[in-house]
Image (cartoon, coloured by chain):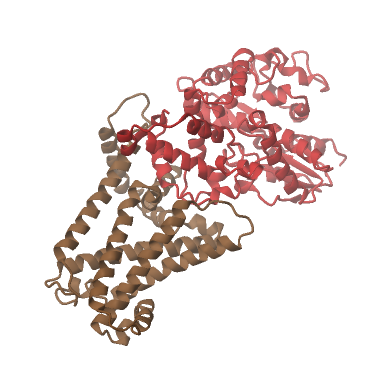
Amino acid sequence: MRLDKLKIKQLAEIDACTRCGNCLDMCSAYQGSKDVSISPKKKMEKLKSAVSKEYGLLSKILKRKLTQDEIEAISHAAFACTMCSRCEVDCHINIKLQDLWLKLREIMVDEGQYPEIMNIMRERLKKARNVSFDTNEGRTDWIKPVPEVPDNMYIKQKAEVIYFVGCVSSFSPRTFKIPRSVIQILQSAKVDFGLLGDDEWCCGFPLMSSGFAKDFEEFAAHNIERVNKTGARVLITSCPSCYHMWSHVYAGVVKDVKMNFKVLHLVHYLHKLVEDGKIKLNPVEKKITYHDPCDLGRNSGIYDEPRELIKMIPGIEFVELENYREYATCCGGGGNVESIDTELSSNIASIKAKEIIATGADIVTTSCQQCIRTIATALKKEKSKIKAMDISQLVLDSINAES
Amino acid sequence: MIINQTALWIIFGVCLFLFCLGFLYRILIWMEGTGGDGPKKRSKYSKLVKCMSLFCRALFSRKAPVMIKSFFADGIVHGNLMRDSILKWLIHMFMFGGLAGFTLITILHVIAIAAAPNTIIDGSGPWFVTVFGTLENRFTTIVMDLSKLAILGGAFIAVMRFMLLKKKYKSVELKDKSAGVIISTIAIFSFIYEASFFLAKGTPAAKAAFAPAGYVLSLILNFIPGVNWSILAAIFFYAYIIALFLFAVYIPYGKYSHMVFGPVVAVYNKLSED
């Protein structure tokens, strides 16, 4: 196993882990499966043993090597992780676990030890440039029911703002309401915005988070080049994973092309539109709770803007979940676990649904299309009447509500 | 109580050498990793030199106060753990603090005895020997006794917590349990050494009471007739220091390397966050 791909610091972190089990309490993969072998603590234990077998003096003398079963066990644990970073919050010696888990997936990919379904996703992305089974020409099919859409479907040569829709919102009918709401809000605020249409490629997050580190570079380069061409000053995304890629990963990957625009998540942009008086929010008399998506919260540090935005809507009674901000639990939709282990993903979502139900809210809102999908399904399974909606839908409802 | 000083120096020297060798061995394993400087291939030793120079540069830069603060707050006091659970934090502080205190005072005690001008532990000689070379010194006695009580107290709370927890998280490994048993055994050996020492020397209660556990044990053991307390003290002295030093030697080679590397990583990651 190519453990020399780990950084010096990461090998030190493996030795530094106390294996106290603090991370076990809130690890979504462990809570959803009760299988301790996939927990962060056990992954660390397995990694330490792997390092010893790979580089230890005793192993060199006795010619001990990692067995196939051991490698498979590490791979299983690595790909059962939702990459939610909750373990990183719980680690009291600040180990950067998220980076370590990502690197571990990369190593497993190099070893050829990863779930077969990852290959399907990889091939699909290389061929169609999106995570769905559709061709990329269908990227703007969701737009059809939106009123007052110009003939160019907002696919313009030049625009002040580019809305990067993301694969899930573009191709999953259950989340079409999100981009539809976004463009209606932008229309009402009279923003000069555009879409990339079939020039929009997947942001590459599914590849990066699956360990296919080299494959997503061309996606990053293509997307940056396309947005630069429009002369946009701002790029907005409604997907937290796309936002994470654009704001935290792209610049480090595509070093020779500069991004000539600012990257904002939709909540930032909506917050600004309300503050600037470009949109007027009318009362919505509902009890609302907010779920922090992992890639927007823990992985990008955005906690305040969505809460402030919700509280800007008159009439709303806002209630926090039991675990919120950096302590929020995963919805089960992260880390490609939904496609690798559907049951595990569903169990994690069910825990989340119970937490939401306990708040007594009418609506659970979030800023992630993937979270909407998993939470809505789980709430349905729990026979709850709580509605799961994106923050853009809530804002649009407020704009359209009678004052 | 007669101690062979040469034997003590050999035991201490060999253990210290193996301990340092263990750390070098671990650190050289880390150097198998990438240094974050792209495809450039460096030798393990070149990476080690680079890391050392980066560390020294950080230590003598404006980051030094952050490093020191983080070392104590994150590495030693474990502020994050305290915010998470006071009980878990107490267990950690008792066990880690106790073990650190016990090990340090034992090292000083052993060096003082080995360096003393005579082979009989009576604490006579230069100030270092007078302070650390005998259990009749109040400071040494109280630190040695209370640090062990802290270890046992921490272990007791941990066991109670585990037994009373509704959810059993299977987070306690066999290695943790074994370490608990080994450290407790070392602590008990050391208590017997304290008690035998007091009985052999006829230490007055006013002095011996600074080691409450050792003193109480000496009162109990005093009921056993016909024991040569000097010989027993010497036996348990050797038993406890050899066991403790062997445990310390094992630290860099096994799971417990986190005791030393935990604070280092906590500081490094804190610095990179800042």
Figure disc tally: 0
In the rendered structure, the answer to whether residue B215 lies left or right of residue A141 reads left
Q: Quadrant of the N terminus of chain B?
A: bottom left
Residue A189's place in the image compared with A403, above or below, is above
In the rendered structure, the answer to whether residue A84 lies left or right of residue B67 reads right
Find residue B261 and report its horizontal and vertical position in percent.
Answer: 37, 48
- Chain identifier for the red-coloured part of the image: A
Residue at 32% over, 33% down: A60
Residue at 30% over, 56% down: B246
* Extreme-right residue of the structure: A402
- Chain identifier for the brown-coloured part of the image: B
* Extreme-left residue of the structure: B117
Report if residue B137 is visible in the image. Answer: no
Find residue A300 and report its horizontal and vertical position in percent.
Answer: 57, 38
In the rendered structure, the answer to whether residue B69 lies left or right of residue A42 reads left
Find residue B232 and report its horizontal and vertical position in percent.
Answer: 27, 74
Asked where in the image residue A172 lies, by quadrant, the reply is top right
